[in-house]
Amino acid sequence: MPPATSVPDTAPADSNSLTVRRLLVDLQGGFSRHWHGGDAFQSQYYNALSMSFPVGEQSFIDSVRDGLKLLPDTPEQVALRDTVERFIGQEATHRQVHSLYNAQLEKQGLVNRWQHWATRRIEFGRSRNIHPRHMLAVTAAYEHCTAVFADGTLRHDSWFAKADPRMQTLWRWHAAEEIEHRAVAFDLYRELGGNHAWRVRWFAYAVLVFTLDACRQTVLNLYRDGTLFKPATWWSALRFFWGRNGMAWRCTGPLLRYLRRDFHPDQESRQAPAITSHALAIRWLTDNANSWQKVR
Ligand SMILES: [Fe+2]
Ligand SMILES: [Fe+2]
């Protein structure tokens, strides 16, 4: 990785300058089953996450759209409205790219069950006519989780170093944009009067549901891949969560920061890393400017 000093860590941490981009990665020709450096577990874990994105990100879009309808039409809210529109543009692009990705997974014989579990829960929530603030709180919670994983993706080169170069680009581009727009749903939730207690309750719900679904879908993928019962698969899983720079060590603390009453997504860790999340995102987008095109 380039030295941490190559980008100032005072880069603007607001979301006012969100750019909607088209990713210049071609997945039409497919990719190998174990695109993550031949590692079955990591390939199928990330495949599982990808399977959740089209439905999940559509729900995020719907929740901020519903929230926007309740935002007073005042000059003070013009900037937030524009940012929310750009958030929708970014998430819509993520959906599109991950739908193409998931179409390749289907060709490889994998079955996406996560999308149905998520759809059922979302439809249930909407059928109860709960206040849009609740769906926004769920979105803000997932956005925090994705921002934490995104930070790891850009900070720890080893997370994707052995992956197919196209997949490295895809996952890092998604990570950079997740960091860029991590505060949008949170800010809208607060503008609409969302409180701390419900924010924390929905966060606990989101983490629980995400963990269960990610486990179920990964196991299903590995089963269909024929690698579920191989010792190498389980050894890889162990290292992935508990090894050097493992998910458990790197993500648990940052995830729990969400419980703080004074938490805001654009606050950087108090442990003062050498380079902030936002600077990591800017650095990746700058260094890989030939991998994307500005849409607006
Ligand atoms: Fe996204
Ligand atoms: Fe997002």
Image (spheres, rainbow, N blue to C red):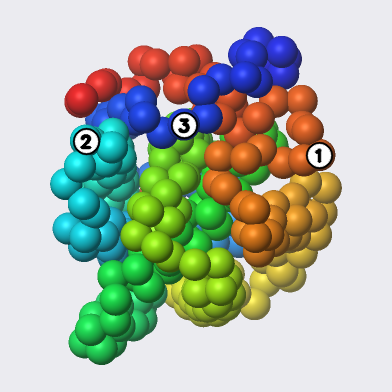
Amino acid type of the residue tagged 3 in the rendering: Asp
Tag of residue 14: 3
Q: Is mark 3 within 8 Å of ligand 2?
A: no
Q: Residue at x 41, y 33 (%)?
A: 15
Does residue 174 appear in this view? no
Q: Which amino acid is tagged 1?
A: Gln
Q: CA distance from mark 1 to mark 2?
A: 37 Å
Q: Estimate the spatial distance between the alpha carbons at disc 1 and disc 3, rounded to whole Å.
A: 20 Å
Helix, strand or loop under label 2 = helix
Q: Residues within 10 Å of mark 3 (few under 14, many from 20)?
A: some
Q: Position of residue 246 (x, y in %)?
A: 75, 52
- For the point 35% across and 25% down, the residue is 17
Q: Nearer the viewer, mark 1 or mark 3?
A: 3
Q: Which mark is residue 75?
A: 2
Residue 271 badge: 1
Marks 2 and 3, how far apart at CA: 19 Å
In the image, residue 42 above or below residue 55: above
Left or right, 20 with reference to 228 = left
Which is closer to the viewer, label 2 or label 3?
2
Q: Earlier in the sequence, mark 2 or mark 3?
A: 3
